[in-house]
Structures are given as structure tokens and as C-alpha cells.
Amino acid sequence: MKIAVMGAGAVGCYYGGLLARSGHAVTLIGRPLHVEAIQRNGLRLHTADADLHVPLAASTEPNAVRDAEIVLCCVKTADTAAAAAAMAPYLSPDAVIVSLQNGIENPELLRATLPHEVIPAAVYVATAMAGDGHVRHHGGGQVVIGQSPHGDTVAAAFAAAGVPVEISDNIEGVLWTKLIVNCAYNALSAITALPYGQLVRHDGVEQVLRDVVDECLAVAAKAGIVPVGDVREGVARIPRIMAEQTSSTAQDLQRGRRSEIDYLNGCIVRKGEVLGVPTPANRLLQTLVKILETR
């Protein structure tokens, strides 16, 4: 199967690398330095069990999605609309777009531009770019996708690549649960520059986490959303299963890049304003990260 990955960052490279290893024709679309390194040496896929160079195609151009049967969209939310517009002229009419992105707004952003089947998905993986063309996996890897006409095909491709995958009939609730976990940890990890395991050892952090989560749940309830699973327990598990991981927001700040904070805690703030739910803890975290982005 021909698969394109729009946005060859840590998540896109990790899943693209696994799919290429399982025999799919994968093309990563990303930044020039990453692409050049991958074209020279293949993708370096570094996990706890292996350190491999995976041969696959790489390009900086959106026309590399041409003829792809599945396109994994892995760009930052602020870039989703532009990425959709850039891909649109080259997509096969039957291409299936899978959103492997943070936040809850990306599927609708993609559908606003593309007439294609768009499958929302949530990923639970700890990855980071360790260098140009080098992705490091720290843990996790599960993908949950929404029910869709081609959902089984997408799920089968992930499963054959060794990715734990499931199809959910409440993908909106799944995405909200992940959003709440991101709201709890992403900003705090970025502001302190600490991995999750160290972060929660500091006095007061657990109460801040509770405040943030309580606000998110109040907004979800007012919006009529039913998050999946025990959200508070899910939040509590993160430092245990990803103790050494820093958030994607922290990684963005370290690289001097714009983060997705406006689509994480900022999303809760915006929805809270519309629904009449106060969100002071989320607003504070959003504001502090925005200040750090300007430094």
C-alpha cells in the first residue's frame, strides 16, 4: 500500500517508519534537513529494542502525496488548514486521510478543505526527534481510530506493522480524553522543562493537575461530551508510564518553535468562554507558555 505522511516530525516518522518496515511504500513529507538526512541514510528508528535505519522515500513537497491510498496528517494544528490546501491538488479521489494530531479540531479543519474521507485518531506514544532523520521512541504506541468506511483497512495496516490499534465508536470522547491529558501535562512540562516523572514530585503540582482536569471536565460536561475511561486515573498514570518524557510543547519551546498551546489549554479556555465555564488554571498555563514562546 502507498502511504504518505504529511508532517514528518516525531509522531509521523515513528509510525511512518513502522509502516515502511512492514512492507508499505511510505513517503515522509517534512522539513529540508530531515528529508536530506533520510534521503542519504534512511530513517533512523531508535527504540528500546533496536536502532535501525529504515529505507523509505522523503520529500519536502506536498505533491509527494500523489497516488497515496492513505495519508497520515501529522502537522501541528496551526498548520492543518495550510497542509490540507497544499495537498488538495495532488490527492487521489479515493485517498483516505487519517488525522494523527493533538487536539480536537483537526478533523473538521481537514474536512473544511478536503472532500475526502477523514478519519480522526488519537495516538498514545512518547517520541522525540533526536536529530535530523532520527526519531527516538520512549514508550507507548497505541492508536485509536474512529469508525469510518475505510477504518478497518487503516487499522489492519497499523496492526500488521505491530502497532496496537482499536476502532472506537466514541472517537470524540477519546479525543477529549487525550486533550485533557495534554492540558494537564504539556504546559507544565514546557514551563518547567521537566519530564513527567520529575515534574510530579514537586509540591503543589498534583493540585494544579487536579485544577486543570476539573476545569476540562466541566467544559466537556457543559458541551455534552462523554470522555472515555477514567480520565483522572489516566492523568495519574502518565508519570508512571512516561517518566522520562517531556511534552511536545516543551520540545517546541526548546527548538524555538511555536507550540500548540492555543489548541490545547487554549481550546479549553475558548470553549469555556462560550459555554460560561470559568477556566483560570488553563488560562494561566496558556498565558505562561505564550510568554515563553516570545523569549
Image (spheres, rainbow, N blue to C red):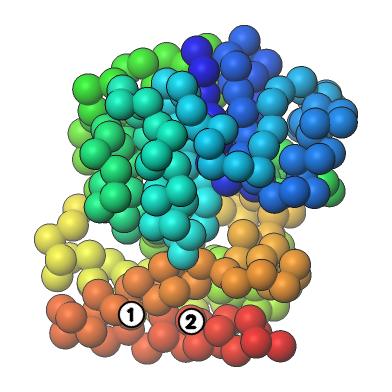
Q: Residue at x 27, y 34 (%)?
A: 116
* Quadrant of the rendered image containing residue 194: bottom right
Is 13 located above or below residue 264 in the figure? above
**Pointer 1 local density, CA inside 10 Å: few below 14, some 14–19, many at least 20:** many
Q: Which mark is residue 214?
A: none
In the image, what residue type sits under mark 1? Val
Give the residue number, with chain letter if any, for mark 1: 269
Q: Which mark is residue 286?
A: 2
**Disc 2 secondary structure class:** helix
Q: Residue at x 75, y 70 (%)?
A: 254
Judged from this view, the residue extending furthest toward the front is 89
**Pointer 2 local density, CA inside 10 Å: few below 14, some 14–19, many at least 20:** many
Would you say the residues marked 2 and 1 are in contact, meaning their CB atoms lie under 8 Å apart? yes
Left or right: 186, with 92 as reference point = right
Residue 265 or residue 154, whichever sits in front = 154
Is 262 located above or below residue 288 in the figure? above
Is 43 located above or below residue 227 in the figure? above
Residue 212 or residue 2, whichever sits in front = 2
Q: Residue at x 25, y 52 (%)?
A: 112
In the image, what residue type sits under mark 2? Gln
Distance from label 2 to label 1 (Cα)?
Answer: 9 Å
| Quadrant of the frame with the C terminus | bottom right
Q: Earlier in the sequence, mark 2 or mark 1?
A: 1
**Disc 1 secondary structure class:** helix
From this viewpoint, is residue 283 visible?
Answer: yes
Query: In x, y percent, where is residue 270?
Result: 29, 79
Q: Residue at x 75, y 67 (%)?
A: 255
Query: In x, y percent, where is residue 146?
Result: 28, 34
Query: In x, y percent, where is residue 239?
Result: 61, 56
From this viewpoint, is residue 176 visible?
Answer: no
Residue 287 or residue 30, whichever sits in front = 30
Residue 264 or residue 227, whichever sits in front = 264
